[in-house]
Image: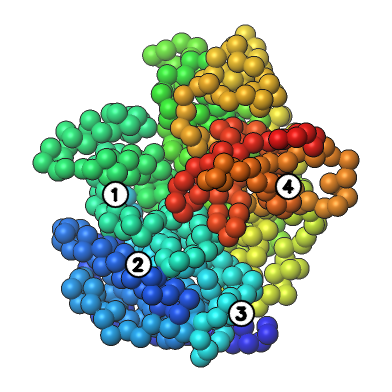
Amino acid sequence: MAERLETSSILWQEQAEFEARKNRDLRFQHGSGPSNIFILDISSSIGDEGVRQMKEAFTTIIDEYSKHPDIDENVAVIICGRETKFLRYFSNQYEDIKSCLDDIEFGGPSPLTAAFLLSHGGLNNDASNICWMANFHFHQRLILISDGRPTDFTIISADDTPVMETDEAKRHLLQTAIIIGRVHPIFCVPIGSNPNLRILEFISGHSKGGKLVRYQDAMQLGKCSYNLRAASVMLQTMKNDCHDKERVVASLALHFPYTAFTEKDKEDIFEMCTRKTLFCSYVEQKVESGEETDLFKERNPIMPCLGSRVRRGRDWKWDNQDNRGPGTVIGHHIKDGWLHVEWDTSAISSYRYGYSRAELNKYDVRVCHEPRILENEMIATGCLVTRGTDWEWDDQDGGAGNIGSVISVHSTGIVIVRWRNGFISQYRFGCHGKFDLTICIGNILGVQLDSMVLASRIPGIFCTTLKLFINLHSDPFSEESIEYLKEQERNAALNYPNGDQASFSEGDALGLPSNRPAISERAQSVDTLTKPILHVVKGKYFKNSEGVDKITPENRRGRPMNQWFWKDDKGKWNPYSIEMNDRINECYKRDPKSTVVVTVQDQSYRVVMSKSLHINLSTKEESEVILVKNGANL
């Protein structure tokens, strides 16, 4: 099996190199705008309904591209089924592209992994270019229209059957997609009568800027570049105000007085502004150009050191720039009394910390000891690291076992780290397949693992992915990590006025009234504050089984039996299965205000515990849930 896997991987990589040459030779027909690679699942598993939905979504997106010739979208098409190949090379000939499915024979297996491997023929070796609009750069994006049910990519001759849809095939697909998604956004459009939303959500969520998009919303996906261009104008003119939705909308009307943006367009543009570093890498521009910058500079010893975790402080006046979550200090401003913070949303801004000529003794932020929680990233600013298996930098870290803080992550696989001894430098985290660093880990899914030992047993393209997967499941709450963060907090408290640093409560940081009850008390009642129904405090979202302790018979014994029930459309209360119930309970135990995705009757639902709801991810229908404690009657 391993030999066959290795052989197939090599063959598809060689084919991708050939396709890259073809795309390069056909540059005369390329569009000058953002590059899009469509991967169209034409396998038998999508069914007649899936074929209709795919054609509708694909045609709608291409039609939307044709409405904006000034953007000049560049499009390539890969089909995946009985044949897996480039159906169209990059061009801006939208009518020709739109008709490319007219004579296609649908059917066969779903070797989606092969299609992703083949997509390198449109991503690498100058097959296409990164596009720039103002300060935004658009990496080539992938648009997968599929039911998300992959088959063994080493077998391409058989028809698609449920038997061929194996866990091994799913694992290969996810591993390959993660590697591509580290740089390229992947948009997944579910089709068919029974798409695997969990896989499609994972692929899009673990890519840089990707999304899961319903086929009915294909027009909005077709407007992605159009809205990004508008967002780039907002960022150039508004700076910090781009975190205020009302101001963004008002500025939009001012700068585009003759453009009719829909409400959905406005929502997308605002979201793009708040997530600007997915498109506009201000840090990377400065570093790569060699320009002098005060990012990553530690100028003042009485200010929090780089890598310190912070929250809004006593003098905060910047609306919701922090999204009410924590961030990381990434530089001391050249102006006295100011520092640069990158919030966990990726937004970067400057804030007051102490003396400045204009304002005396103002503190917009305070140091906290909240670790960085990875969500859709493999590594991120604020993560704590130690030297890894490819370390070759002597004792820059102060010696083996010492902890450092990540203060910047580049798409090239390079990260910048500030060590406890104050030394700051760049290290490899995936660059050329090398890992100088390991994210601080306690245990991974309940098992102590050595990433390099495991990776050495897996052929070819999956070695890097496995190491990334292991880091994804690291434990940021290890004793060493928390102690390191508390040390930074104690040091900062020495220079924070009147002891406010130590006494400033988390409730204050979240902007909550001081008379709110404790978390344990709030768990018993519905929060009375007006918030979006799916509002979740950053770092408190446990998706599927990630971050949830594995349930075993040993740790189940002795626990009270808390059973969750859901109400069907007939008003009947139904218990969740043992597996789903355990999943909800573990997330509830960690934070009663978190959410979790569960499966009921082959449908995926998001359980919002604080609102006593579960929501169908496909239909968006809501129904009630209830917790019955200690075996009490319903």
Q: In the shown orientation, is residue 542 left or right of residue 82? A: right
The residue sitting at 70% across, 69% down in the picture is: 455
Marks 2/3: CA distance? 24 Å
Precedes in sequence: disc 4 or disc 3: 3
Dot 3: element = helix
How packed mark 4 is, by other alpha carbons closer than 10 Å (few <14, some 14-19, many 20 or more), is many
Q: Amino acid at mark 3?
A: Val
Foreground mark, 4 or 1? Answer: 4
Marks 4/2: CA distance? 36 Å
Q: Amino acid at mark 4?
A: Asp
* Residue behind mark 2: 53
- Residue positioned most to the top: 498
Precedes in sequence: disc 4 or disc 1: 1
Asked whether residue 631 is in view, the answer is yes
Q: Are marks 2 and 3 in contact (CB under 8 Å)?
A: no
Report x, y in % for residue 27.
24, 76
Residue 534 vertical placement versus 167 (above, below) = above
Task: Tell me the number on the disc at residue 228.
Answer: 1
